[in-house]
Image (cartoon, rainbow, N blue to C red):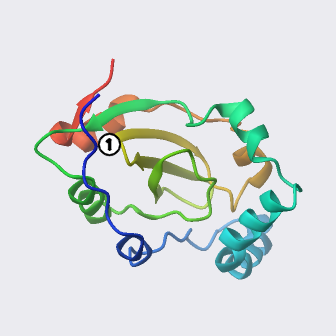
Amino acid sequence: MQSSPTTPSKSWIRALPYSRVPFPSALSHRAKYFIWRLYTPLHPHMRDVSVALGLVSASAKVEKWGARQDYLMGTIAPHESITSVIEYLIEHGYANHFVAWKDEGEVVSLRYVENFKYQYHVRIFEDGEVRAHYEYTPECHPVHHYNAVGFEDRRDEFLSLLGDRITQAY
């Protein structure tokens, strides 16, 4: 593993554009859309309070998925920085996905929302590791999302997007 690339400041991360799902065409999803629009700003606080009060166990998450979720793509290439890779992903439609669990050492969680139902999700870590997967959005299927139902590797798509910005893991 390479040496730790420079980690952007928390204020820089907070200033990234927020990810939002598009308004759903299916009538059955519209109530979910409005509920999540109200809940989203509260999520980081609710997540942290729920863990602190023991309502949701952070250790259960680690037992289920490990300290970091699956699908390691690689590490930030030596000629890149965490910031440059984040900026590149933002230019390609990704945005800050703060309505997500935080994996150990995670700097940022970015997603590209394909539609109300599916998203591409990239996590970048302070040691330069990049992990990514395709999944249900939490807004459409929160239980499936939480339980990692339908997680897909989509490795070729992510590697094609990231190109030489990462050193590929095998």
Where residue 21 appears, as percent x and y from the top left, is: 56, 68
Q: Nearer the viewer, residue 26 or 68?
A: 68
Left or right of residue 160: residue 11: right
Q: Nearer the viewer, residue 156 or 102?
A: 102
Against 78, is 89 above or below?
Answer: below
Give the quadrant of the C terminus.
Answer: top left
Against 24, is 82 above or below?
Answer: above
Left or right of residue 155: residue 64: right
Name the residue at 80% across, 61% down: 52
How many numbered markers are drawn?
1
Against 163, is 114 above or below?
Answer: below
Outermost residue on the top side: it is: 170
Residue that mark 1 sits on: 128
Outermost residue on the bottom side: it is: 38
Where residue 40 appears, as percent x and y from the top left, is: 67, 74
Against 102, is 21 above or below?
Answer: below
Give the quadrant of the N terminus.
Answer: top left
Name the residue at 61% across, 57% down: 100
Where residue 123 appears, as percent x and y from the top left, is: 45, 48
Name the residue at 40% across, 77% down: 11
| SS assignment at label 1 | loop
Q: Nearer the viewer, residue 106 or 138?
A: 106
Name the residue at 73% across, 76% down: 39
Where residue 62 appears, as percent x and y from the top left, is: 69, 36
Callout 1 crowding tier (Cα within 10 Å): few <14, some 14–19, many ≥20:
many
Mark 1 belongs to which amino acid? Gly
Q: Nearer the viewer, residue 54 or 146?
A: 54
